């Protein structure tokens, strides 16, 4: 299993548009991916947009992605890059 | 052939197919279904259809408002693909043996409750998205069409009534005419019809039924009638009439480039009213001397967030530069009362026309006002801009406004941003402002009399209430006295005075206004040449 830790810098947090992009990206991998908001300890399936949005991730919150599966290495690298770029 | 009658908003004749916009309420009830598998399949089919609608909306929005704003429909689509949402609905159908309408509605409410309980305004807005997509699926399940205009060829719109946000979302090039059952000559549909120069009827005695959808019809703005499925003879006669009207319009075009001067040598400025950046086309085509009323509300209505300074700046700049040095008078935000946008979060009011609106909002929530002023001043560097403030009742208000304006100018100067000379004026649309116009004139460069509101407030007649139309007198002597007083008081202090309400286009009053010494008339672009023709015949 691989993990990615990231602190959100986007002023509105993981809101509709980036959440949509994030879920789209996560759905492209075979691995199971969960995302946890360390602020409230809620965890969601990263491939489900409603669940991801209901984590209520705001600016300054730390999220942890847990990635498990065949393509976990690529997923880890690419998702980390995506987070840095967009959020 | 069926004939109906309504109140005509604009002379002219339109021929085309009817497009019925029916407001149908949800009628589903909770039901037990025996075959849950086919009910689940019914849900899946409706979901697919809803996804296709969203695809189309996304494409339309991309073309009209850009990717940033269109993205919301893409997010809606993703929500409709969300497995948690879909599984909850399908499980509900299967385990509770309920109909899809019920399962979708209840699940939508459940998911939306999660978002609305979050202490984050942005997330709370997602609650509305969930309800929106659920509503869309239920509409498809019930076979109800989405309100709005989905047509390739231009049509005659037949509706019970239309709200400003409904009309704003319509592609104006697809509208030949409006026919509404409700509404008055002053309703928003009527004002939009005038600005689009299309014949329209309001308060029409026709039933709004889907049966008329797609039928051939004629809207005759001259006689105020709607003819559905006309016979060949009628069709031919109206075609002829339409051609004659067009010919008269062609003749008026010969007046382009001529002066607005009476036979006995009196002159008046003829400016145009407009409410959308695209309207500049019509303003220029009809040879207006300037823009006497640029309604800035269009920037705020029909969207979910405040327009940014940059967005506003771009819109003002485009209009100001395209007018090439001719005066552009921008009226600051006149929202509230009957023109509303949800994101302003205005409280419901008992008496909105007398309520929290226009300058009252701007002076209370100054960040909104300052953003708009900054945008206008920045745009003023590209031509001749003027600003006027709506709903003024006192000198004190103008002083507060001027202090804010000075502050904004100092801020821009500090940032090294260029701006031009901007004339400041006010709308005279309350009897209070007319009565103290002598004092107000010392503070501003010009007055623009808004006759619609001035009449409504002077006569205490709600212009949205069609029952009151028999009592409404646009030529009431009280209103004319207030206008004359305003002109006189303005001139005494060196302020110029114009009229920008509907009364300005009333050619039975043009001579009266000239006699009063009025300096400017601002009307819908379509009236400019007609008025020029009228003015040139005065004093012959």
Image (cartoon, rainbow, N blue to C red):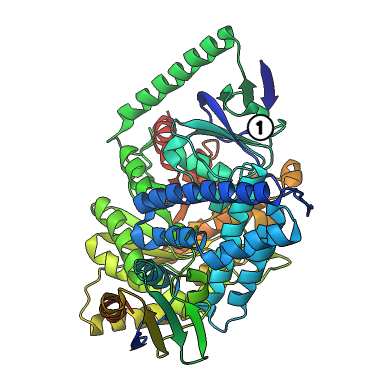
Q: Nearer the viewer, residue B435 or B380?
A: B380
Q: Nearer the viewer, residue B320 or B124?
A: B124
| Residue B52 visible at all | yes
Q: Nearer the viewer, residue B162 or B77?
A: B77
Percent position (x, y) of residue B38?
Answer: 66, 46
Percent position (x, y) of residue B503?
Answer: 55, 45
Which quarter of the figure is the N terminus of chain A placed in?
bottom left
Element type at mark 1: helix
Q: Quadrant of residue B491?
A: bottom left
Percent position (x, y) of residue B342?
Answer: 57, 66
Q: Nearer the viewer, residue B107 or A46?
A: A46
Residue found farthest to the front: A70
Which quarter of the figure is the C terminus of chain A placed in?
bottom left
Q: Is B174 left, or right, of A81 in this rendering?
A: right
Question: In the rendered image of this protein, does residue B511 appear above or below residue B425?
Answer: above
Percent position (x, y) of residue A27?
Answer: 39, 67
Q: Quadrant of residue B178?
A: top right
Question: In the rendered image of this protein, does residue A49 appear above or below residue A62?
Answer: above
Report the number of numbered marks: 1
Q: Which residue is mark 1?
A: B210
Q: Is B268 left, or right, of B193 in this rendering?
A: left
| Residue B273 visible at all | no
Q: Is B502 left, or right, of B286 in this rendering?
A: right
x 30%, y 83%: residue: B411
């Amino acid at each position: 299993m691989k993990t990615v830790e990231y602190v959100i810098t986007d002023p509105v947090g993981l809101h509709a548009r980036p959440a949509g992009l994030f879920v789209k990206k996560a759905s492209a991998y075979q691995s199971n991916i969960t995302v946890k908001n360390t602020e409230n300890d809620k965890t969601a399936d990263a491939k489900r947009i409603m669940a991801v949005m209901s984590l209520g991730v705001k600016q300054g919150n730390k999220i942890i992605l847990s990635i498990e599966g065949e393509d976990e290495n690529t997923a880890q690298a690419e998702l980390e890059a995506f987070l840095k770029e967009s959020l | 052939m069926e004939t109906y009658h309504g109140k005509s908003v604009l002379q002219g004749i339109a021929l085309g197919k009817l497009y019925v916009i029916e407001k149908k309420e949800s009628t589903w009830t909770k039901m037990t279904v025996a075959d849950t598998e086919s009910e689940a399949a019914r849900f899946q089919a409706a979901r697919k259809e809803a996804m296709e609608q969203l695809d189309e909306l996304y494409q339309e929005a991309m073309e009209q408002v850009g990717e940033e704003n269109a993205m919301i429909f893409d997010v809606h689509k993703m929500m409709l693909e969300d497995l948690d949402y879909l599984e909850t609905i399908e499980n509900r159908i299967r385990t509770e043996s309920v109909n899809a309408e019920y399962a979708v509605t209840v699940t939508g409410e459940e998911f939306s409750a999660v978002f609305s309980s979050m202490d984050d305004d942005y997330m709370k807005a997602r609650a509305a998205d969930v309800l929106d997509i659920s509503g869309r699926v239920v509409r498809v399940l019930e076979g109800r069409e989405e309100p709005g205009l989905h047509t390739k060829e231009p049509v005659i719109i037949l509706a019970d009534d239309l709200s400003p946000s409904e009309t704003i979302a319509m592609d104006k090039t697809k509208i030949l005419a409006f026919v509404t059952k409700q509404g008055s000559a002053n309703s928003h549909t009527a004002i939009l019809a005038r600005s689009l120069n299309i014949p329209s009827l309001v308060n029409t005695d026709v039933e709004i039924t889907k049966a008329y959808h797609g039928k051939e019809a004629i809207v005759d703005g001259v006689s105020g009638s709607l003819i559905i499925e006309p016979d060949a003879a009628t069709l031919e006669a109206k075609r002829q009439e339409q051609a004659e009207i067009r010919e008269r319009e062609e003749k008026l075009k010969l007046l382009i480039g001529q002066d607005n001067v009476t036979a006995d040598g009196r002159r008046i400025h003829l400016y145009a009213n407009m409410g959308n950046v695209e309207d500049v086309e019509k303003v220029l085509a009809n040879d207006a001397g300037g823009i006497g009323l640029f309604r800035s509300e269009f920037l705020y209505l029909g969207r979910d967030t405040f327009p940014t300074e940059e967005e506003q700046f771009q819109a003002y700049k485009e209009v100001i530069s395209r007018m090439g040095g001719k005066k552009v008078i921008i009226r600051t935000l006149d929202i509230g009362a009957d023109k509303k946008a949800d994101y302003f979060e205005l409280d419901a009011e008992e008496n909105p026309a007398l309520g929290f609106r226009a300058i009252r909002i701007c002076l209370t929530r100054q960040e909104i006002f300052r953003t708009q002023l900054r945008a206008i001043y920045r745009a003023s560097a590209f031509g001749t801009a003027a600003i006027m403030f709506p709903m003024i009742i006192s000198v004190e208000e103008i002083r507060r406004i001027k202090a804010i304006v000075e502050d904004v100018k100092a801020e821009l100067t500090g940032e090294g941003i260029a701006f031009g000379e901007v004339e400041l004026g006010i709308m005279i649309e309350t009897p209070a402002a007319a009565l103290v116009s002598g004092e107000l004139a010392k503070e501003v460069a010009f007055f623009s009399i808004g006759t619609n509101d001035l009449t409504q407030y002077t006569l205490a007649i709600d212009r949205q209430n069609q029952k009151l139309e028999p009592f409404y007198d646009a030529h009431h002597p009280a209103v004319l006295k207030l206008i004359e007083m305003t002109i006189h008081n303005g001139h005494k202090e060196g302020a110029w005075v114009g009229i920008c309400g509907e009364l300005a286009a009333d050619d039975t009053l043009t001579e009266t206004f000239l006699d009063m010494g009025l300096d400017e008339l601002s009307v819908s672009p379509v009236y400019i040449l007609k008025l020029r023709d009228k003015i040139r015949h005065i004093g012959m």
